Amino acid sequence: MRFVLENKIALALAALLLVCSVMMVRRVEVNQTKHLELREAFVLLYHRGYPNEAQRLYARLVRSVQELTDQQLSEDLQRTLLLVDPTTQHPADPIWKYHWTIKNELEIREERGLKRAHEIAGKG
């Protein structure tokens, strides 16, 4: 009991940091789940013949591309690759457009990573 009384500020700070960490991890999981749910709703609506609703979800997905992690983009690319023929162009198909948007974003990020790798190699 004496330890708690002597270190109550440090213990309160540790408890606060623990709670904040748990909340942050939970927020990340919720955001990932929301994106997955949004992507799957987009695919389902498009394939079931609801182009207006699918187009609205497409717009939301495209707006969020910059905020997605590389892992989420890769998962989206793999998912859309199953639904499109990458050798042909279908500019009217929102799934095809989303696939190419993701692919282009990943290429841009890869170029940035390559540039950074060259910078790191030059410092050695």
Image: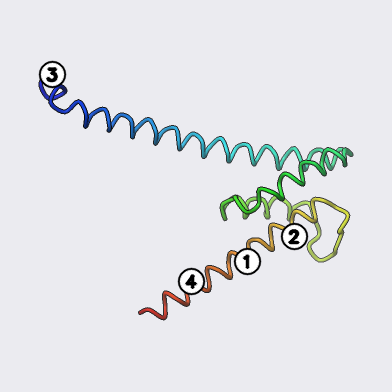
Amino acid at the residue labelled 2: Trp
Estimate how packed mark 2 is, as few (under 14), some (14 to 19) or many (20 or more) residues with alpha carbons within 10 Å.
some
Q: Position of residue 6 (x, y in %)?
A: 12, 26
In this view, the residue farthest toward the left is 2
Asked if 83 appears above or below 43 in the picture, the reply is below
Residue 60 sits in quarter? top right
Q: Residue at x 69, y 57 (%)?
A: 102
Q: Are marks 4 and 1 in contact (CB under 8 Å)?
A: no
Asked if 111 appears above or below 37 in the picture, the reply is below
Q: Position of residue 70 (x, y in %)?
A: 57, 55
Quadrant for the N terminus in the image: top left
Which residue matches tag 1? 108
Instruction: Say which label, 3 or 4, has the lower sequence index.
Output: 3
Q: Are marks 1 and 2 in contact (CB under 8 Å)?
A: no
Q: CA distance from mark 4 to mark 2?
A: 24 Å
Instruction: Say which label, 3 or 2, has the lower sequence index.
Output: 3
Instruction: Say which label, 4 or 1, has the lower sequence index.
Output: 1
Which residue matches tag 2? 100
Q: Residue at x 83, y 38 (%)?
A: 53
Q: CA distance from mark 3 to mark 2?
A: 62 Å
Classify residue 99 as left or right of residue 116.
Answer: right
User: Quick one: 85 or 103, which is closer to the camera?
Assistant: 103
Which residue matches tag 4? 116
Amino acid at the residue labelled 1: Ile
Which residue matches tag 3? 1
Estimate how packed mark 1 is, as few (under 14), some (14 to 19) or many (20 or more) residues with alpha carbons within 10 Å.
few
Query: Regarding mark 1 in the picture, which secondary structure is present there?
Result: helix
Amino acid at the residue labelled 3: Met
Query: Regarding mark 3 in the picture, which secondary structure is present there?
Result: loop
Q: CA distance from mark 3 to mark 1?
A: 57 Å
Q: CA distance from mark 4 to mark 1?
A: 12 Å
